[in-house]
Image (cartoon, rainbow, N blue to C red):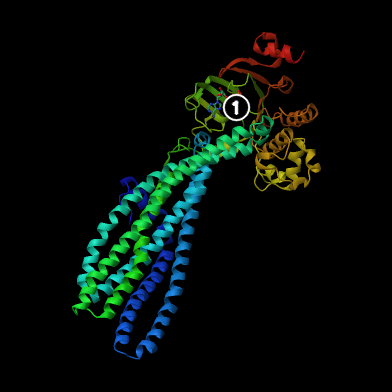
Amino acid sequence: MAVGLATEKQEKYAGRFLRDWLLPQWPWFALGTLFAAVTAACAFGYSYIIAMATDWLEASDQRVFMLAPLVIIGLVAVRAPAMYGQTQANNRGVQNAVIKLQEALFGRLIDGDFARLQAKNSGEYVSQFANDMVLVREASLRVATNLAKSTLTVIAAIAYMLMTDWLLTLVLLVIYPVAFYPVVRLGNRVRKSSRRAQEQAGELTSVLNEAFQGSRTVKAFQLEGYQKDRASKGFIERARLYMKVLRAKALVDPFLEFVGGLALAGLFAFSGWRAMSGDITVGELVGIIAAIGIASPEVRALGTLNSVVNEGLAAATRVYAVIDAPVHVADNPGAKDMGRAVGDVSFDGVSFSYPGASPALNGLSFDAKAGQTIAIVGPSGAGKSTVFSLLLRLYEASAGAVRVDGHDVRDVTMASLRRNLSIVSQDAFLFDVSVRENIALGKPGASMQEIEAAARAAACDFIEGLPSKWDTPAGEGGRNLSGGQRQRIALARALISDSPVLLLDEATSALDSESEARIQQALGALAGRRTMIIVAHRLATVRKADRIFVMTDGRCAEAGTHDELVAHGGVYAGLAAHQLS
Ligand SMILES: Nc1ncnc2c1ncn2[C@@H]1O[C@H](COP(=O)(O)OP(=O)(O)O)[C@@H](O)[C@H]1O
Ligand SMILES: [Mg+2]
């Protein structure tokens, strides 16, 4: 392959890319190559008939206007459809490969570690799908097209030339590779600048996303100017980096033009002299020029192939960096399906720190027996949401054990663990599908009756008043709905699955007291049948819990019932005095 001086690592990726994605599409590429061979054979035919016709013309042979035009029309009639067929076959093969690659990339991301999804700006991943895939597609198409068509056409031209004048051909074959060395060098420059340009494209996507998503804050705080500055810096940097890539690429064509011109001059000097001395006929000279004329664009395409392939390789390297990244939180070997849990939950001396941060949990212990309602209260930043993340095994504890039904969460499959837990998380995230679908996501294949029952329990009567009722789209992240409406849909989504453990993270914080009271009632009806762990700031929400754990600084400071804790006279008693007076 015309990869030239690509690094060893990139050559490895090129090999993997061919094997993993392009090879499975081999029937399409085989078909493309077949058409390419026909195209190349016709090119050989052109040179041949041009040479013949010239000699016929010189000899005043009638075949020049009778036979030659027919042969040329015949050649075109075969070559044009073959060119079309080749392009289409290659397109199909490459598109299929890119679909598979996108699926693999997305699958690795979405199946992989939660921590990784959180670590980068989302824009950088989105940009990989937008930009890197285009580069990979372009490079694959060029390889598929040029390797077959251009190589075969050049080979056909060389074959014709060798048959006609081997000495001249040998001279050309020695000069050309030397002339091409600088093109390979340019390709490497393209690859280097392309890598940085793509990284920056991802950063820019993030900045733009943030400005649009945070448009309310932007407007309210009059941050338009600030956002424009940020975006403008990004645009300028993008243009600067892109110019670097284009500059290296822009040198390729003029350089090839220059080489081509030299070659033509040399050709006339050398073969003109050979024709004069009678070593070749005028027809043969014209045939050679025709062959070079046909081969030149193909040689040129092969020359620029290097830089396109280098860009594609840089993109493939980034894609593979994601695909190859080790997954840290995965099913352990021998992890078993825990089946349906009874609903005991316990944390036993659990510690955990987010990457590069101080400990969020610090030897936390608490437990909930099946069917109990327990509450976790504490100041923000105490680690309450982190408790749920560890229970769902989005992250792994660095010390201690998280157990469900006595099983360490590391010993069971993540699918069976998460089937037993349903959560209303603090952000009450909704997808931009109908409210009906948003609720149904909690239980695949849920009937309308089940959806309505869950919605009723979550006090979702506002749905009937929405513009399209149950079919109203929630908007990106749920922004067509109010905070309280979003929370109620998210609650319905959690209630519809009959998982034995229900986790509510400040799930009613945005509700009016009437809706909250109704939800309390609905949840009260579940008590005894489901384990509920409720995080809330309003003590009215948690005072009926079987047990309340007060968290500070990642550990449990106090535990007991509402009355016990008030009597104890600690942190909770202070909160209670403040809130419930
Ligand atoms: N994704 C994260 N990366 C780094 N630190 C985090 C992340 N999420 C939370 N933290 C930190 O962990 C601590 C506990 O957070 P959290 O569990 O959300 O608290 P709470 O829910 O009690 O308000 C806080 O100090 C917070 O800054
Ligand atoms: Mg929280």
Observer-nearest of 13 and 296 = 296
Observer-nearest of 457 and 146 = 146
In this picture, residue 361 sits left or right of residue 310: right
Q: Quadrant of ligand 2?
A: top right
Mark 1 element type: helix
- Above or below — where is 193 with respect to 59? above
Quadrant location, the N terminus: bottom left
Number of residues whose C-alpha sits closer than 10 Å to that of mark 1, classed few (under 14), some (14–19) or many (20 or more): some
- Above or below — where is 573 with respect to 519? above
What's the residue at 43%, 59% (across, down)?
141
| Residue 66 position by quadrant | bottom left
Residue 491, how many percent across, how many down?
70, 35
In this picture, residue 71 sits left or right of residue 216: left
| Residue 176 position by quadrant | bottom left
Observer-nearest of 392 and 384 = 384
| Residue 564 position by quadrant | top right
Residue 220, how many percent across, how many down?
69, 31
Observer-nearest of 151 and 477 = 151
Quadrant location, the C terminus: top right
Q: Is residue 473 visible?
A: yes
- Above or below — where is 448 with respect to 520? below
Ligand 2 neighbours mark 1 (CB distance < 8 Å): yes
In this picture, residue 480 sits left or right of residue 276: right
Q: Amino acid type of disc 1?
A: Ser
Q: Give the residue number, with chain letter if any, for mark 1.
A: 385
Residue 87, how many percent across, how many down?
45, 66
Residue 322, how many percent across, how many down?
45, 42
Q: Is residue 341 visible?
A: no
